[in-house]
Each structure stands twice: as C-alpha cells, then as structure tokens.
Image: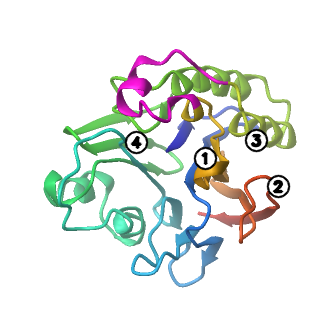
Amino acid sequence: MCILFIYTDPSPPAGGYRLIIASNRDEFYKRPARKAFLCPKTNIIGGRDMEPGREGGMWLGLSIRPPAIKFGALLNVTGEEKRAATSGRGPLVYNYLKSAESAPQYLGGLKSRNSYSAFNLFALEVTPDESHGYHHSNSPEATLEYHGRQILAFGNSTPDAPFTKVRKGRDRFERIVGEARDKTDLIERLLQLLKWEESHLPDPELARRAPAGADFLSSVYVKMEKAGYGTRTHSIVLVDAACNVEFVEHTMKEPIDGTNPQWEVTVLKASL
C-alpha cells in the first residue's frame, strides 16, 4: 500500500511552487532498499529497490534534464485477481525517467495489461511554461490526463473509487498547500500528513479489496508490526517557480525495528 498527493501549477504566484509532491511508501520492513540519491550520469533522483533479483526498481523518482522535469510514481492496485505476470513493475518508473520519450509516448508503448501485476503509474512533466500529468493503470487499462493547476491524490485502488484515506488526505493536503507560511512550515505540515495515523473507517472499497487488513490500512501512515509491514519512507518534492528542485526523504534506517524505527533524512537539490 502507498499513497501519493500532487499539486501542480504552471503559473505559480511569486514565492509559489510549480510542483508539490507528498508520498508514502508502504513495504515489508525486511525488503532491502537504497535511500534516495542523485545519479550524476542520468540526473535522476530517487531510492532503489535492492531486493535480490529486483535491484534497481523504483517506486518514485524524478529526472531533471532540459526541456522538462519528469516525475514518476508507481503504486500497486490491491485486491485484483492474481495473474501470471511476465514482467516486473519495478523498472516502469526508472525507464520512463531515463527515456527521451514524452509521457504519452512512453505510456502508449507499455506492454499489454497482462504482462504486469495490477498497477497505477503516474507520470508528470513540468517545464517553465507548462505542466502535464498522466495516470495510467492496467486494471482496467486506461489513461487519464491532467493539465494546468491540479490537486490530485492516488492510492491502491482505481481513481474512480479512491479509499477514504485518499479522499480525506487530499482535502488536508489542499489546506496545507493553501495555508503554509513558508517552505519550512510546508515541509513540516506535509510530514505531519504523511504520519497521520487516524483510522478512516468505514471504507467499503478498502474492505472489499483488503478485508483482512482494512483496520490497519485505513490510515495514511500504515503500521502492521506483527506482519513486519508499514510505511517506511516519506518523500516530499518541491519545484519552485524557477524550476529549482528540492527532494526531501525521511526513511527508516535498516535493519528496521517497526516498534522503534530510526529515521534517516536526505535532502537533495537540483535545477532544470
């Protein structure tokens, strides 16, 4: 389970932002991962999956190469019928970020839906003049487009049936974007959102998709200590009016103790 909040504005006011991202990665604590870093060869920022056989996969990241800043995020779609996937989903974000293709070109060239387990893939491109976002899912196969100023939220269901925590989280995210006094205040409030442990039940869609875990999965911050699973990484991305990028990651230090996690903070900066 993961959650993603997005704000875009192609014409931000003075001191405003073209892009604000707040996202949680929920994963098994034992699954190894590399914390976010900036690769100088590709100008790609993000963490990496280090699970044996799946090394290099990305759940979220961005590239900073003219003419655009590209952002990508991958979320699974829970509760879907298992299929014999022939391709892993891990490379989807990285391949988009390193490619010279636009988001529509890349998404249009993906293999058929049966090649992958169910997923939501969000691709966004920001330039000094424009902002274009695309949500692509293979369950069912569909692509949605978003242009101009947007406030969006995605989780582990289809966009037409969001979990309650996604809807309520989006509302809180919108208030934060509108009320934050400065960058420090904005980042602090976004972290509070990502650490929000309030349960958002009842949630018929979550109960339908994950009946055994709905009680634990109904909050933005997920904690399932007995299962060794939960929210282990917070990611915040800010792109200001001049296309300066700040990537802030709070991630649990491995080996992870779910009852008393130690957090590592990484701050990376770049410019288009």
For marks 3 and 2, give the CA distance. 18 Å
Which numbered disc flags the more N-terminal residue, 1 or 2? 1
Q: Nearer the viewer, mark 3 or mark 2?
A: 2
Which numbered disc flags the more N-terminal residue, 1 or 3? 1
Residue at 35% across / 63% down in the picture? 92
User: According to the image, what is the colour scheme of the structure?
Assistant: rainbow
User: Callout 3: 10 Å neighbours few (<14), some, many (20+)?
Assistant: some
Q: Amino acid at mark 3?
A: Leu
Q: Position of residue 118 (x, y in %)?
A: 28, 48
Q: Return the residue at label 1.
A: 24
Residue 116 lies, with reference to residue 205, above or below; the image says: below
Task: Confirm whether residue 242 shows in the render.
Answer: no
Q: Position of residue 184 (x, y in %)?
A: 86, 43
Residue 112 lies, with reference to residue 240, above or below; the image says: below
For marks 4 and 1, give the CA distance. 19 Å
Q: Return the residue at label 3.
A: 191
Q: Nearer the viewer, mark 4 or mark 2?
A: 2
Quarter of the C terminus within the rendering: bottom right
For marks 1 and 3, give the CA distance. 10 Å
Q: Magenta residues? A: 199-215
Secondary element under disc 1, as helix, strand or loop, is strand
Mark 1 vs 3: CB contact within 8 A: no
User: Callout 4: 10 Å neighbours few (<14), some, many (20+)?
Assistant: many
Secondary element under disc 3, as helix, strand or loop, is helix
Q: Nearer the viewer, mark 4 or mark 1?
A: 1
Q: Return the residue at label 4.
A: 133
Q: Amino acid at mark 2?
A: Asn
Residue at 49% across / 51% down in the picture? 127
Extreme-top residue of the structure: 202
